[in-house]
Amino acid sequence: MFSLSSTVQPQVTVPLSHLINAFHSPKTTPVSVSASISQNQHRDVVSEHEAPSNEPVLNLRDLGLSELKIGQIDQLVDSLLPGFYKDKNVSSHWHTSHVSAQSFFENKYGCLDIFSTLRSSCLYRQHSRTLKRICSDLQYWPGFIQSRGFKTLKSRTRRLQSTSERLAETQHTAPSFVKGFLLRDRGSDVESLDKLMKTKNIPEAHQDAFKTGFAEGFLKAQALTQKTNDSLRRTRLIVFILLVVGIYGLLKNPFLSVRFRTTTGLDSAVDPVQMKNVTFEHVKGVEEAKQELQEVVEFLKNPQKFTVLGGKLPKGILLVGPPGTGKTLLARAVAGEADVPFYYASGSEFDEMFVGVGASRIRNLFREAKANAPCVIFIDELDSVGGKRIESPMHPYSRQTINQLLAEMDGFKPNEGVIIIGATNFPEALDNALIRPGRFDMQVTVPRPDVKGRTEILKWYLNKIKFDQSVDPEIIARGTVGFSGAELENLVNQAALKAAVDGKEMVTMKELEFSKDKILMGPERRSVEIDNKNKTITAYHESGHAIIAYYTKDAMPINKATIMPRGPTLGHVSLLPENDRWNETRAQLLAQMDVSMGGRVAEELIFGSDHITTGASSDFDNATKIAKRMVTKFGMSEKLGVMTYSDTGKLSPETQSAIEQEIRILLRDSYERAKHILKTHAKEHKNLAEALLTYETLDAKEIQIVLEGKKLEVR
Ligand SMILES: Nc1ncnc2c1ncn2[C@@H]1O[C@H](COP(=O)(O)OP(=O)(O)OP(=O)(O)O)[C@@H](O)[C@H]1O
Ligand SMILES: [Zn+2]
């Protein structure tokens, strides 16, 4: 319950008229002041029952006392009633703890003990003796403070039951003026304060001042609580309004409402996202896919136009392609182009351990989509919901989820305007039922972009950053065979970060090359200490590769040579295909092998056969793979003919040894060709190795300058 009583003063209604009446009514009922006052008995005196609630509330101005300060009460009382406290026998055990006394009082009466509060907050500490006693007495006055607290039915009945008993006790135990109040309320004789003062021998002239002193105390307390009360009411109003507005917003806001509803598990739903800002313009390098999806856009724009002629559009389109090639982007662009809602769901969201949850989510998704047709539902990672998996302990209800998906897809008519686009990296993993006509019956391949596509994607993302005019996106595109759109976006972003770290104003080719190498080969290992001997070996090894590449007609053009350690390598030479190679010629394959051999040949020629290193092992791997494929797959061996040998382990020993023999010959010949070139160009080889030792990294132009025997400009 909403209880503020411990921190903020609750609403107070002090029946001041009682106090004032007591001061001024000359009632003369005999007084019996009890000497022994028990705290518990006193508490029990007061009950909610007896609290007069409609009494007029006086304010300070009515009494002409608005200027009187609380601190003055003590003085006032002391001067007016010198002997009053000395002989008043107030039990000292009351003062043990005003905090617990107060909470005890509250629990008991359901109202706040304002005197105790006053006493503890200001008076008690400052006037420990005199006012403490006054306040102790006042504590048992029926000054009612209606606390907005927590009351149990039990405690209330208990109070009601015991009221009469307690009143009886009061007559013997309560201070006389308290009793006066109580008894007056019940129509009995009332003891007046005047009488009390007479028994205490207060001089007549001082009695009025004494009474007003008490009145002032009450009024001060009331004024204070009234003020607090006003601000409390205002705060409550504001909190209430905020609460109402908050709940309303929660239900109205689509994003929040999704979250709100998804927390309820079974009732989860997905809300659409309007995709106005994503169009086909944003998807680069996948022209064929865009063309195929164009008709879906037309359909979404005007479903009737298509169905009038009896045409049937696919319900489901499957986008197939490697990760990061823009499948999600394409689906968004379809919705954006058609300006219809886009419902995104990831297959893994439906993969639930609990029975029915996945199926229920699918149901909700389709229900909402149908209500908002025309629209696009996109299910990413379709294989994780629609895979051909047998029910396993990990996915106990997958079958149920697939069935629900199939049922939903079958359940709406083609012209309803709902298009489901699924995306997967593994179409072969999909359940056959899903790719049957009437379901995901249109497949669109989204391949990795070719060099033209990569150039376009790089240009697109370069245009979003500051880059130098000398940047040639095509060079980067040529060096990033196999990169997806997402990887190219990342490359440009990393280059921008690198430029920022280096304090550059623009991104140049250097940063782009840097981030490309970082993605391809891992980060630079600048901290690695490589001794001069190893550095020299690496420089000659890498320039060996470069020289072969440079002087072999069918080798790919060199892009860069470096002896900067990166990832697991100590250096590398990168070559750029002029185009994506869809086909490779025999000469090109042999050239690749020769370039691979260049490193080891260089080591042998420069340092001697005893000083060759282990650094060429991956070069040999590479060369061996090419040679093996030439012999067993491409029919490029005269001896073994145009036959393919897929499982070499199952071949006859003779064939196996013949294959091995052919591979060995190819590798040996390659090694010899490389040796010949390096011997012929020993001078260039040496110059290049020295340039690498000096500059660490050389680009294509610089390599050419060195090999032409020109001097490199000092960088
Ligand atoms: N062809 C592209 N043109 C422009 N940006 C692209 C392209 N491909 C990918 N991107 C960028 O990469 C991000 C990731 O691509 P997206 O999520 O569409 O790939 P995906 O094929 O759906 O990948 P996944 O299979 O991992 O879900 C896109 O948001 C976009 O920024
Ligand atoms: Zn090498």
Image: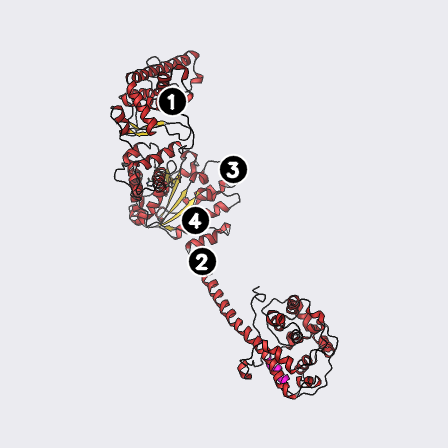
Kindly report which numbered mark, 2 or 1, lies closer to the viewer in this rendering. Answer: 1
Kindly report which numbered mark, 2 or 3, lies closer to the viewer in this rendering. Answer: 2
Is 43 on the left or on the right of 631, as rendered?
Answer: right
> Residue 143: in sight, yes or no?
yes
Residue pointed to by mark 4: 365
Residue type of the residue flagged with mark 4: Leu
The front one of 80 and 646 is: 80
Residue 251 marker: 2
Magenta residues, as a range? 11-30
Residue pointed to by mark 3: 391
The front one of 548 and 64 is: 64
Give x and y (percent) for residue 665: 36, 13
Rounded to the nearest angstrom, the CA distance separating label 2 from label 1 is 70 Å
Chain-order first, disc 2 or disc 1: 2
On screen, residue 9 above or below 665: below
Kindly report which numbered mark, 3 or 1, lies closer to the viewer in this rendering. Answer: 1
Q: Quadrant of residue 405?
A: top left
Residue pointed to by mark 1: 537
> For the view shown, which residue lies furthest in the top direction?
654
The front one of 245 and 77 is: 77
